[in-house]
Amino acid sequence: MNPRPILRGFFALCVAVLLLFARAASAADIHVMISAAYHQVYVELGPAFEKASGHRLVTTRGPSIGDSPEAIPNRLSRGEVADIVILDSSSADELAKRGLVRGDSKTELARSLIGMVVKEGAAKPDIGNVDAFRKTLLDAKSIAYSDSGSGTYIGNVMYAKLGIADQVAGKSRKVRGPPSGEPVAAVVARGEAEIGFQQVSELIHTSGVTVVGAIPAELQPGFSFAAALTTAAKEADAARALIRFLDSQDAAPVVIRMGLAPIEKR
């Protein structure tokens, strides 16, 4: 009996076991806090990252801003555990100023547009230019927007920019988002608001509505979504690996399919 094949097989098995133990030893639980607009991209890419890296993603959802106890800034302020946050880019900057995230780790992942929906089957209003859009808002019987970044911009900035804040304030409703709430589009689908606004990437995943389109370019706030390490990160190296994965060119097709735009690399 030739012992060489047996020895080769035994050696290969030993190498495989050693590699397995090395992988297990380096595997980490990465605690991620993420806002809704990037969540669908993350949900699709996350399993591929886990398989390739051996790390496990432990995810908590919440809005980028707002007074909800689920909002990411409020969670971090309470001392909830997170290695990385993925949220509105300007919110990441504010968290860095407060010493809750590492500003030098911030990486922009995708650009986002605010869009508008109506109930499925309803006529699509004209929002093709600023004047038509203003008229649509004034004519609407009810308006819904999120309690996160896009809704804060609409209620506090866009209405004033259009000169209609007083006329539309009484018929506007702020909707608390996931995890305890729901997308704005769900409120519109039930007929509880005639028109609704949120990030396009959040609107396109709800049935029962028609996406009218993005609001006029002149009124877009230039939102983008970014990842950053928290100052309390316990698994910083693993979290950096996740950021590199989400920032890779391989992620771009998923970003586009989910209603966002990749960040152009210089």
Image (cartoon, rainbow, N blue to C red):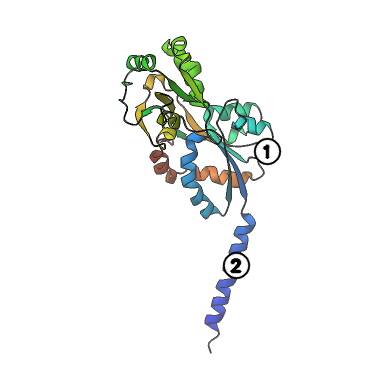
Q: Is 203 left, or right, of 58 in this rendering?
A: left
Viewport quadrant of the C terminus: top left
* Residue that lies at the very extreme toward the front in this rendered image: 191
Occupied quadrant, residue 216: top left
* Residue that lies at the very extreme toward the bottom in this rendered image: 1
Q: Compared to 33, does 176 lie above or below?
A: above
Q: Compared to 41, does 224 lie above or below?
A: above
Number of other residues with Cα within 10 Å of mark 2, as a class: few under 14, some 14 to 19, many 20 or more: few
Number of other residues with Cα within 10 Å of mark 1, as a class: few under 14, some 14 to 19, many 20 or more: some
Q: Which residue is mark 2?
A: 17
Tell me which label, 1 or 2, sits earlier in the chain.
2
What's under tag 2, amino acid-wise?
A: Val
Q: Which residue is mark 1?
A: 232
Q: Is 43 left, or right, of 60 in this rendering?
A: left
Please state the horizontal and vertical placement of residue 225, each as a whole percent of the image. 50, 33
Residue 263 showing in the rendered view: no
Q: Nearer the viewer, residue 154 or 15?
A: 154
> CB of mark 1 within 8 Å of CB of mark 2?
no
What's under tag 1, amino acid-wise?
A: Ala
Q: Compared to 239, does 162 lie above or below?
A: above
Image label count: 2
Quote the CA–CA distance across marks 1 and 2.
34 Å
Q: Secondary structure at mark 2?
A: helix
Residue 155 showing in the rendered view: yes
Q: Is 77 left, or right, of 149 in this rendering?
A: right
Please state the horizontal and vertical placement of residue 100, each as a whole percent of the image. 65, 32
- The disc placed on residue 224 is none
Q: Secondary structure at mark 1?
A: loop
